[in-house]
């Protein structure tokens, strides 16, 4: 049901790290920082991360969106016009086009305006006040807003295979829409802020695999004014979209390029961990083998509303994740009963109704093994087939459990054990990963079926990381040579800058209420060792700024002897909407905790098509590590609120 | 013998993670109103640190609690006559600006109304007392969280100032603990004695100390009369407010909201029986270090047939007697003696008890893997500074009592570890067990209550007694639209 | 006719308002019955202002009892001559009056200048302070200046008997006709002040906790005994 899998597959999934690395032009400001490690290999470890990411996309290791500079709808149309009927033929045709360089990889042309993310829909995320690593690059290149980027591409390490425009594009996004009930910085950057219902105004469910409970959200009041629940907001957008599509965007075929994926046969597409780049290593580009898969998806734009509001037919073919398949025939019949039959004229008529959030909740509760015992058993049976082990007994005794929204409203229920959810393992044991692997002889999802300590992929070996390895923190300065033009008359100190999760919440969770913002010292603050602070004339609660080539943040100092010298802590997500004055460097608003950081991609995370080293959405892929930030801290001499 | 019942609490400090959930849920439930923004019935202090309000333990300044003058118990701030003479100005009272903090919020509205500009707008901090912008907050209820402020703030802790040895606050020697605090609901409350209007009182049936909002005239002597500084002045209604032990919840058999929501499950609630006739004598013991023992002598053994007989005579029903027998407080504070009262030297006989934390000490042990059972004794002894500090908080400076409790807790750890993963030696004949003056059975009982006890074992709260004089049948369904009609109806 | 209004009708209206208003507030507005201290906001100036004012007003009250409620004959019977009485009254009265005026001026300035105190003061608070100040200033003027420099007015033969006659419901209003205007204004302003007592912070004067020294330090109360 997620990503409309009941109607069409595959979805267009992209890994965020790579997307934002290119969309915010951070690849322009790369620095060679890990000189010592670079000495070990050479073939891959010397590659610029952007070049490596482009290679990962081309070899089918990672997803890559936008796909090509050319329109994917038109590409399929051209193939059809050439008389290609089968999907295979179209895929072959695409491979040929790519080989002959008749289409351009968008990842290699990020500065081409055709590849810009022109319409950006931000749903319940504080992308521009919290989560976006390298905030100032987001502000500059993606949004075209005020920024404090102090790095210069001229002095940075530049990629070789990426086509870079002389003048970096600024403001790639034309329309930025936010749907998020929290008052975050992201809303301030948005063209349109949709009024969103809060937790207490809508129906929803929540769980994580870190605890065993399924929690409901129940509306205490109706959403005030024009506010809508997320479900209703998206549904209404789909309604208008479908209507407009009747005239402007008729049904057509789309080409979707997807990477070699986790828990599928793709895991053995590129055996022995050898890297063969079809562009230069003399192998043929074969979709699904040496390059990504190409699939044709029928886009029925005028019917998106009907697809959104009913359960599609493909559920009947079975569904699941992580390679576990639950048969769908009975599920579909059950859903017709439980959700009711859609009576709206059109594509969805006669299908299980999915009009409201409550429908969606019931559908999820019915289809998930964590909340429906039959599905749990079906899931284990599916894994039995794969592993040859007796597993169905793990969920035994729960076959008749089928939680409804009313059930979990009366009391949050504990999840049922399933092969894909670790919130509850067997016998009420909570979140104890891998115990079933040991007790039921279920092979680990690795090449050997055991826990893997040695990774023999060529890239891993090239980086010297075939075995677990201690790597010291990266040793570099806050600026590259020639970049530091910040006037600095007073005292300052170079420190390691860390942004750990705060004490009272992760990200902006619950911490923007008055009680939480004032429980400690108000926002924003940076912790520093008191001897360090004294050495540059900072006293407790003084205004300070922290800056480096990535940007600057203004805050107040919390001095203490509890943290060691040489480090400053700026807790996550204090959000620049509250109590943040101007920085002294360029008199811009003082930034967020991520103003001083940057995405530091790690190439070994980008490996794909090799057993457990295969991309899986929200499962396996590169992270935007920012832990090795070095910055300068100094007193902020005067406070300018930039208001009045 | 005048038997009374008291609902009370134990907090096990080793389990406190300093998350402040208790403070926030309490605030959201009881003090989220204008006039009490600065009021935290429950707060959590990082120690060493000055606490909230700033340096509340400084009795020279606030003059809270009782003193012994010529063998007689007197309020430190002065008795009724001197209070009446000072009624127009209370020299010992704290102020929001200096001792509490100016509560603030952020000007969120501005984020919506700011004109179009090059720079993103910002919600500036704004005082909740004046509605005016403030440049930056300078104090809060938890300003020194996790030793924030370092050497500028932590040494202002009155307990630190009392330590014989000067402690150097530095990274390598950091020790830290959390101290969650609510009203102590004392057996000999000095706030009650300080109230000129008689608005403060101790409830007969559960010992909860309350402020009668109609009788309070706002004289404010309770604020500093309480040595724990746990009575607050609502500047909007001009009346005193304080923690009321969530009596609407305890009357229904539910734990206080701070206990209910405690993430570390550090809190225990139960009832104890005590002899009200012995309170005054116990509070009047000469040597402050003997006050802890004296306080223990006030409590009655709920299993003693004599006590049960007397209790019934006093109108205490069987459920409450049974509650006293199953009380986790009775076990920890009176039977095992591992929970101690906060600042017994104030002579108020406080009824929130603390199991001292072992962690500040254990964290300094480096070779725990190889340590033999008796190796723990010198390990505990060597940690002089934390031990003296704990003694200053909990035993009027008597490190002997602290040492004994810590050894007992250590013995429990060693024993339970030996039981589950095998010990380094035979602890049964160890010096540790002897010095801790305990038995294996007791240690296991302790381990169960301290580590695995579930909700119903941690909270043993008999529901409120309703067999009393009210005409409940007549009052059923009555609502308290007090301005229009008396809620009790007309028949009295 | 006007003297009937000022010296008969007005006093009884004020008396009625005072008694009924206070009873109403006692019965239905207990929650608002408090000494609305602002000490929590500011201490330094309150220490001087409040102590001056309150002790001053206590002395002034005693002075008024001595001058208005106790008849001249009582003093004469004791052998206290008019000269001795007046010397004592002028010195004592001036001292008390000055304490009150100085205290009130400090409190008023504090109320205006100190932001938090100002913001937490209502119209009634300002009204009260200003009215008390007016009454006190007039009284102090009468005692310390008028009586000394203009003439020593013997109010114990006019205002005193008239005021006492109010309680016997035989108001001798004609006694007031010859009284100097400044005294009349002081009396009328005082009556306005009396009328405002049930509606302002002044109500706290009735709750001086006189029983406090005589009660047991510890108070036990049972839930069901409450309000019974």
Image (cartoon, coloured by chain):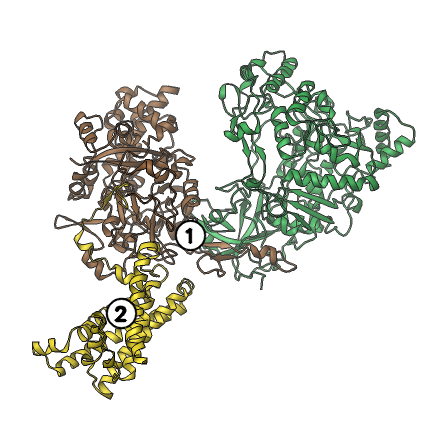
Chain colours: A green, B brown, C yellow
Q: Seen in the image, is B362 located left or right of residue A342?
A: left
- What label sits on residue C52 in the rendered view? 2
Q: Seen in the image, is A47 located left or right of residue C51?
A: right
Screen quadrant of the N terminus of chain A: top right
Where is residue A300? Give x, y as percent.
Answer: 79, 33
Q: Circle 1: is it few (<14), some (14-19), or many (20+) Cα within 10 Å?
A: some
Tally of numbered discs: 2
Q: Circle 2: is it few (<14), some (14-19), or many (20+) Cα within 10 Å?
A: many
* Residue B305 falls in image quadrant: top left
Vertical placement of residue B39 versus B135, above or below: above
Residue plotted at (30% across, 34% down): B466
* Residue A341 falls in image quadrant: top right
For residue B248, say whether it is visible.
Answer: yes
- What label sits on residue B37 in the rendered view? 1
- What label sits on residue B371 in the rendered view? none
Do the residues indicated by labels 2 and 1 lie within the same chain of the protein? Answer: no
């Amino acid at each position: 049901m997620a990503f409309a899998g009941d109607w069409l597959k595959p979805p267009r999934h992209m890994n965020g790290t790579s997307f934002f690395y290119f969309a915010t032009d951070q690849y322009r400001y790369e620095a060679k920082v890990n000189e010592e490690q670079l000495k070990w290999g050479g073939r891959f470890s010397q590659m610029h991360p952007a070049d490596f990411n482009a290679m990962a996309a081309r070899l089918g290791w990672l997803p890559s969106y936008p796909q090509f500079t050319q329109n994917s709808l038109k590409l399929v149309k051209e193939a059809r016009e050439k008389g290609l009927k089968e999907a295979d033929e179209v895929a072959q045709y695409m491979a040929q086009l790519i080989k002959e360089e008749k289409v351009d990889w968008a990842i290699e042309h990020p500065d081409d305006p055709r590849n810009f993310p022109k319409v950006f829909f931000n749903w319940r995320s504080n992308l521009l006040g919290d989560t976006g690593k390298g905030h100032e690059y987001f502000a500059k290149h993606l949004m075209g807003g005020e920024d404090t980027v102090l790095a210069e591409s001229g002095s940075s390490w530049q990629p070789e295979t990426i086509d870079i425009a002389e003048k970096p594009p600024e403001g790639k996004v034309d329309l930025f829409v936010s749907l998020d009930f929290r008052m975050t910085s992201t809303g301030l950057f948005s063209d349109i802020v949709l009024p969103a219902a809060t937790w207490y105004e809508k129906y929803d469910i929540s769980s994580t695999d870190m605890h065993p409970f399924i929690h409901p959200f129940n509306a205490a009041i109706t959403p005030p004014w024009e506010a809508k629940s997320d479900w209703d907001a998206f549904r209404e957008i789909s309604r208008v979209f479908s209507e407009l599509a009747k005239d402007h965007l008729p049904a057509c075929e789309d080409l979707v390029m997807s990477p070699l994926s986790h828990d599928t046969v793709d895991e053995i597409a590129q055996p022995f961990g050898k890297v063969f780049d079809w562009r230069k290593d003399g192998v043929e580009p074969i979709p699904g083998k040496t390059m990504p898969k190409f699939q044709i998806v029928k886009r029925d734009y005028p019917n998106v509303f009907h697809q959104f509001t009913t359960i599609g037919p493909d559920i009947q073919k079975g569904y699941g994740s992580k390679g576990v398949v639950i048969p769908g025939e009975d599920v579909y019949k059950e859903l017709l009963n439980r959700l009711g039959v859609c009576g709206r004229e059109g594509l969805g008529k006669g299908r299980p109704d999915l009009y409201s959030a409550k429908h969606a909740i019931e559908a999820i509760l019915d289809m998930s093994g964590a909340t429906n015992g039959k599905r749990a058993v079906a899931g284990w049976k599916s894994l039995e087939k794969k592993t040859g082990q007796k597993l169905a007994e793990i969920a035994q005794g729960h076959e008749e459990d089928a939680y409804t929204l009313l059930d979990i409203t009366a009391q949050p229920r504990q999840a049922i054990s399933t092969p894909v959810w670790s919130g509850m393992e067997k016998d009420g044991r909570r979140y104890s990963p891998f115990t079933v692997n040991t007790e039921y002889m279920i092979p680990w999802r690795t090449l050997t079926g055991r826990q893997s300590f040695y990774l023999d992929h060529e890239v891993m070996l090239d980086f010297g990381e075939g075995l677990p390895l201690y790597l010291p923190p990266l040793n570099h300065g806050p600026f590259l040579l020639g970049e530091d033009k910040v006037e600095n008359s007073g005292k300052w100190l170079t420190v390691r800058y860390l942004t750990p999760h705060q004490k009272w919440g992760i990200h902006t969770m619950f911490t923007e209420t008055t009680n939480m913002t004032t429980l400690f010292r108000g926002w924003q603050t940076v912790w520093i060792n008191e001897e360090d602070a004294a050495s540059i004339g900072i006293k407790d609660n003084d205004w300070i700024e922290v800056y480096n080539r990535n940007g600057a943040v203004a805050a107040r100092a919390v001095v203490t002897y509890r943290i060691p010298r040489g480090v400053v802590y700026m807790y996550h997500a204090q959000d620049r909407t509250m109590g943040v004055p101007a920085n002294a460097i360029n008199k811009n608003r003082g930034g967020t905790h991520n103003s001083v950081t940057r995405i530091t991609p790690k190439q070994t995370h980008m490996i794909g098509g090799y057993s457990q080293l295969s991309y899986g959405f929200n499962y396996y892929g590169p992270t935007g590590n920012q832990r090795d930030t070095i910055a300068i801290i100094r007193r902020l001499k005067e406070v300018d609120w930039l208001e009045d | 013998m005048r038997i009374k019942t008291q609902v009370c609490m134990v907090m096990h400090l080793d389990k406190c993670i300093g998350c402040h959930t208790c403070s926030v849920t309490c605030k959201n439930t009881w003090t989220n109103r204008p006039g009490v923004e600065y009021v935290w019935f429950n707060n959590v202090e990082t120690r060493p640190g000055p606490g909230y309000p700033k340096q509340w333990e400084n009795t020279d300044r606030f003059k809270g609690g009782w003193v012994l003058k010529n063998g007689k118990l007197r309020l430190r701030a002065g008795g009724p006559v001197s209070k009446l003479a000072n009624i127009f100005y209370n020299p010992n009272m704290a102020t929001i600006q200096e001792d509490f903090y100016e509560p603030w919020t952020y000007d969120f509205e501005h984020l919506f109304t700011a004109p179009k500009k090059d720079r993103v707008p910002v919600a500036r901090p704004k005082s909740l007392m004046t509605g005016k912008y403030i440049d930056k907050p300078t104090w809060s209820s938890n300003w020194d969280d996790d030793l924030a402020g370092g050497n500028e703030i932590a040494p202002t802790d009155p307990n630190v100032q009392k330590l014989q040895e000067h402690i150097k606050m530095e990274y390598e020697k950091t020790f830290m603990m959390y101290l969650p605090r609510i009203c102590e609901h004392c057996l000999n409350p000095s706030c009650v004695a300080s109230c000129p209007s008689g608005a403060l009182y101790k409830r007969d049936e559960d010992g909860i100390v309350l402020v009668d909002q109609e009788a309070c005239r706002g004289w404010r002597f309770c604020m500093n009369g309480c040595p724990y500084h746990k009575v607050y002045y609502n500047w909007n209604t001009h009346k005193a407010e304080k923690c009321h032990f969530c009596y609407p919840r305890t009357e229904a058999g539910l734990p206080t909201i701070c206990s209910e929501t405690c993430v570390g499950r550090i809190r225990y609630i139960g009832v104890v029986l005590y002899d009200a006739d012995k309170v005054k004598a116990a509070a009047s013991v000469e040597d402050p270090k003997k006050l802890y023992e004296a306080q223990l002598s006030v409590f009655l053994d709920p299993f003693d047939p004599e006590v049960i007989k007397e209790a019934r005579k006093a109108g205490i029903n069987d459920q409450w007697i049974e509650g006293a027998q199953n009380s986790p407080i009775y076990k920890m504070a009176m039977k095992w003696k591992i929970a101690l009262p906060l600042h017994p030297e104030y002579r108020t006989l406080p009824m929130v008890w603390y199991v001292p934390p072992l962690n500040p000490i254990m964290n300094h042990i480096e070779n725990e893997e190889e340590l033999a059972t008796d190796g723990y004794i010198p390990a505990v002894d060597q940690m002089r500074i934390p031990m003296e500090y704990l003694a200053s908080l909990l035993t009027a400076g008597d490190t002997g009592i602290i040492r004994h409790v810590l050894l007992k807790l250590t013995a429990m750890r060693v024993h339970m570890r030996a039981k589950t993963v095998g010990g380094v030696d035979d602890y049964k004949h160890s010096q540790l067990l002897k010095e801790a003056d305990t038995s294996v059975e007791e240690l296991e009982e302790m381990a169960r209550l301290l580590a695995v006890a579930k909700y119903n074992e941690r909270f043993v709260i008999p529901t409120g007694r309703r067999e009393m004089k009210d005409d409940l049948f007549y009052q059923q369904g009555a609502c308290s639209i007090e301005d229009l009609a008396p809620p009790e109806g007309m028949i009295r | 006719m006007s003297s009937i209004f000022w010296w008969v009708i007005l006093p009884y209206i004020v008396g009625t308002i005072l008694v009924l208003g206070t009873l109403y507030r006692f019965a239905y507005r207990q929650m608002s019955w408090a000494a609305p201290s602002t000490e929590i906001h500011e201490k330094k100036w309150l220490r001087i202002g409040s102590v001056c004012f309150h002790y001053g007003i206590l002395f002034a009250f005693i002075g008024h009892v001595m001058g208005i409620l106790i008849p001249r004959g009582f003093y004469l019977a004791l052998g206290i001559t008019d000269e001795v009485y007046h010397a004592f009254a002028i010195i004592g009265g001036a001292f008390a009056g000055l304490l009150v005026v100085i205290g009130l001026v400090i409190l008023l300035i504090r109320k205006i200048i100190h932001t938090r105190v100002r913001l937490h003061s209502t119209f009634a608070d300002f009204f009260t302070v200003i009215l008390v100040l007016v009454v006190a200033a007039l009284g102090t003027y009468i005692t310390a200046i008028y009586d000394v420099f203009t003439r020593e007015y013997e109010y114990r033969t006019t205002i005193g008997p008239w005021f006492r006659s109010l309680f016997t419901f035989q108001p001798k209003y004609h006694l007031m006709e010859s009284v100097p205007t400044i005294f009349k204004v002081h009396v009328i302003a005082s009556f306005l002040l009396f009328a405002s007592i049930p509606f302002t912070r002044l109500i706290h004067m009735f709750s001086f906790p006189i029983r406090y020294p005589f009660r047991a330090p510890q108070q036990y109360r049972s839930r069901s005994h409450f309000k019974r």
